[in-house]
Amino acid sequence: MSWHYLRPSLASPELLQKLLAQTGEDFDCPICLSPPNSAVITRCAHVFCQRCIQKTLMCDKKSCPLCRFALTESDVFSAPLDEAENESDTDSNVKSSAKIDALISLLEETRERDPLIKSVVFSQFTKMLTLVQQPLKDAGFKYVRIDGSMSATKREEALQAFKSTKSKSPTVFLLTLKAAGTGLNLTSASNVYMLDPWWNAAVDDQAMDRVHRLGQTRKVHIFRLIVADSIEERILDLQERKRQFAQVAFGKSQEQQRLMRVEEVRLLMRL
């Protein structure tokens, strides 16, 4: 079977917008359960690795593995390359923010006390990590990064570079919450910076536990950068409420649990 993709200009603009939005954040291919390699989107709006969906459509029954929508090679689209390139070009021109300025200030204070101390910076958004990179360079920090778009090989290279004790090794590690949630040992760091809270406190806790675990010899400091009078404060309130709910949730009826979830939404929206 030959494999041909339609030119991006022939694809639905809505589909391509959805593809760029999904692959801009951490996203796993539903077939291989890994970050997509050469991500493509189907006419039924599901994103896969190019190779994974190619193998699937080589089977006798050609359909989407998720929704069983009938698919052919012409129903699979890729994002325009120049659009991604233009996006990366404009990132360097974006002005800093108060939160990023605060992060750089805290990192500089740490460097003044001890230039060998290593720090881990978490965000749920890959875009946020990209915005942090240029200010880090300008401040003279060496950093490495892991997000959902990187291959296992690249992740391992970044991890080993950060663990290095050489004088010129990176002292800052940029990670997305999902990419660093499990399987990483980051005890070479002792400072953790959370750039944004996730509504589920367990996700934040898992990420922080990568640093505060067996083998850690330093005292671990956790910093949360929260914008005052914003939804981030409400998310922190929600995290605390969810911790309290978790202690009694197993004794609640289905109706009581439903009302608890409604209350969570009201808390976020301040209704």
Image (cartoon, rainbow, N blue to C red):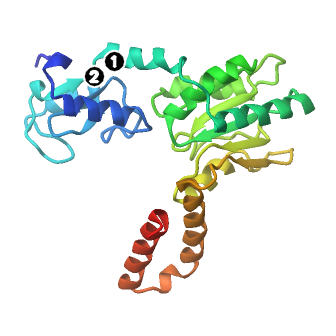
Residue at the disc numbered 2: 79
Question: How far across and down, in percent of the image, does residue 236 sit?
Answer: 60, 60
Crowding near pointer 1: few (<14 within 10 Å), some, many (20+)? few
Evaluate if marks 2 and 1 touch, with contact meaning CB atoms under 8 Å apart.
yes
Q: Is residue 48 left or right of residue 258?
A: left
**Toward which corner of the image does residue 98 lie, by quadrant?**
top right
Classify 104 as above or below 33.
Answer: above
Res. 175 in view: yes
Residue at left offset 57%, top offset 41%: 123
What is the x, y in percent for residue 264?
46, 69
In front: mark 2 or mark 1? 1
* Secondary element at tag 1: helix
Dot 2 falls on a residue whose secondary structure is loop
- Residue found at x 56% / y 54%: 230
Q: Is residue 119 left or right of residue 256?
A: right
Residue type, mark 2 in image: Ala
Q: Which mark is on residue 139?
A: none
Q: Which mark is residue 83?
A: 1
**Residue 222 in picture, x, y percent from top left:** 75, 49
Q: Quadrant of the C terminus?
A: bottom left
Q: Nearer the viewer, residue 162 or 82?
A: 82
Marks 2 and 1, how far apart in space? 8 Å
For the point 76% across and 27% down, the residue is 171
State the image quarter where residue 19 is shown.
Answer: top left
